[in-house]
Image: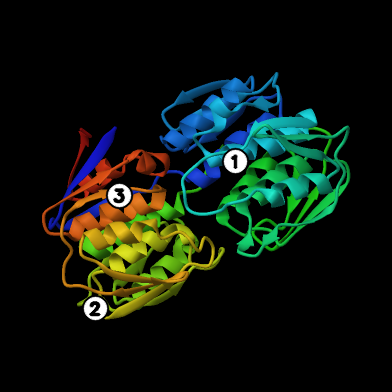
Amino acid sequence: MDKILVHGGHPLSGSIKVSGSKNSSLPILAATLLTKEPCIVHGVPDLSDTHYMLQILTHLGAQVERASGTVSVTAEKTHSVAPYDVVRKMRASVCVLGPSLGRCKEATVALPGGCVIGDRPIDLHLRGFEALGAAVRVEGGDIKVFAPKLSGAVINMQSKFGPTVLGTDNVMMAAALAEGVTVIEGAAQEPEVVDLATFLNKMGAKIEGAGTRRIIIEGVAALHGAEHRVIPDRIEAGTFLVAGAIAGKGVTVKRVEPEHVRTTTDALASCGYHIDIGDHEISIFPNGAASALELTTAPYPGFPTDMQAQMCALLSISKGTSSVTENVFPQRYMHVAELKRMGAQVQLEGATAVIDGVDCLLGAPVMASDLRASAALVLAGLKADGITEVSRVYHIDRGYEHLDEKLSELGAHIERAKAA
């Protein structure tokens, strides 16, 4: 098992290109199951999660070819059973339910695994399928959905913590081949949902309203092959911008959609960083001592929960007292104990982290608990005195394409080593 060693105190400068979006790639790859014809998806990042998805597609009968960031999928024949051994490593594997149900009118998928960031139920996915006319059973650790036919319905995807992104994706994929019109109320507005809808429309689906709280899907009899490039990864872009804030002399993030990271750049500007925004690139520069911030996560277009841990790392060395309130996954604070090992002053008050900025952090052995927490610990290590040793970096490899190599290109002193 690998670990990452971060030698702190080396300033970052230069530019880096953002990879394709993980959270777009996974449902778009799953959507290729909706047609017998070949689909080509460009910009798929080299991540363990995308590798797992391709394994799942292969297990379900698809022919898969990968060359660099381009993936070709032909699901001429497919079956609908994805057992635990195939899906256990990735929660997003649940997004094969929708396309399998849409095309085969049945699907069996083991209850998914994934990183530990609190309760993330899929009840809304299943209620959406039931509204379309499917019967749903959960037995022996498997989710089983089946229907003689799917019919359009009005479905609400809103939970007490906001709309479900994967639930919106799943229902949208199943409804694309349902009879009649489906209306998703309380739909997730994330750019990744819009990207999936764009791909489905290229395949011949009739979807309107993606990016709003109300998506309308007019079912069609069949879908065809399509070619598509996934959008840039907004969370990777935000992570590199925070890296530039923590340890940068001037860092430019290229191949980014500025509107997708607007709340992150607004937050960084509020801390006192100078931000230059171009058409598809953003630069961040230090501008005196960084100041404290009050931050609250919310579903898109609010501040993303996937950037909360990284901002905690930054605010731990920002002057004054900051507060971060987690409204999407209230238990998502596993990184706090590890940051405190490095000298951060953080107190948890329910779903709010109160952070008193310190002058410096100290390198220490720390343990990654989930994808974004692991990135936050690496970022904190960039500024810490000494060496920060981050273990369980397989979490990083789930969602960041060669994070250590990209940071090295910017001047970080960072290396991989085998854990003892």
Q: Which is more N-terminal, label 3 or label 1? A: 3
Rendered residue at 38%/48% (across/down): 369
Would residue 32 be found to the left or right of residue 281 on screen? right
For numbered disc 1, what is the local secondary structure? helix
Residue placed most toward the observer, 353 or 264: 353
Residue contact between numbered discs 3 and 2, judged by CB atoms under 8 Å = no
Would residue 168 be found to the left or right of residue 119 on screen? right
For numbered disc 3, what is the local secondary structure? strand
Q: Quadrant of the N terminus?
A: top left
Rendered residue at 77%/28% (across/down): 104
For numbered disc 2, what is the local secondary structure? loop
The quadrant holding residue 20 is top left
Kindly report which numbered mark, 1 or 2, lies closer to the viewer in this rendering: 2
Q: Amino acid at mark 1?
A: Pro
What is the distance, in whole Å, between disc 3 and disc 2 at their CAs?
28 Å
Q: Quadrant of the C terminus?
A: top left
Image height of 89 relative to 74, above or below: below
The quadrant holding residue 379 is bottom left
Q: Which residue is label 3 attached to? A: 16
Q: Amino acid at mark 3?
A: Ile
Q: Which residue is label 2 attached to? A: 319
Q: Within 10 angstroms of label 1, few (less than 14), some, or many (20 or more) residues?
A: many
Q: Within 10 angstroms of label 3, few (less than 14), some, or many (20 or more) residues?
A: some
Q: Do we see residue 149 in this rendering?
A: yes
Image height of 179 relative to 376, above or below: above
What is the distance, in whole Å, between disc 1 and disc 2 at their CAs?
41 Å
Residue contact between numbered discs 1 and 3, judged by CB atoms under 8 Å = no
Residue placed most toward the observer, 327 or 98: 327
Q: Which residue is label 1 attached to? A: 27
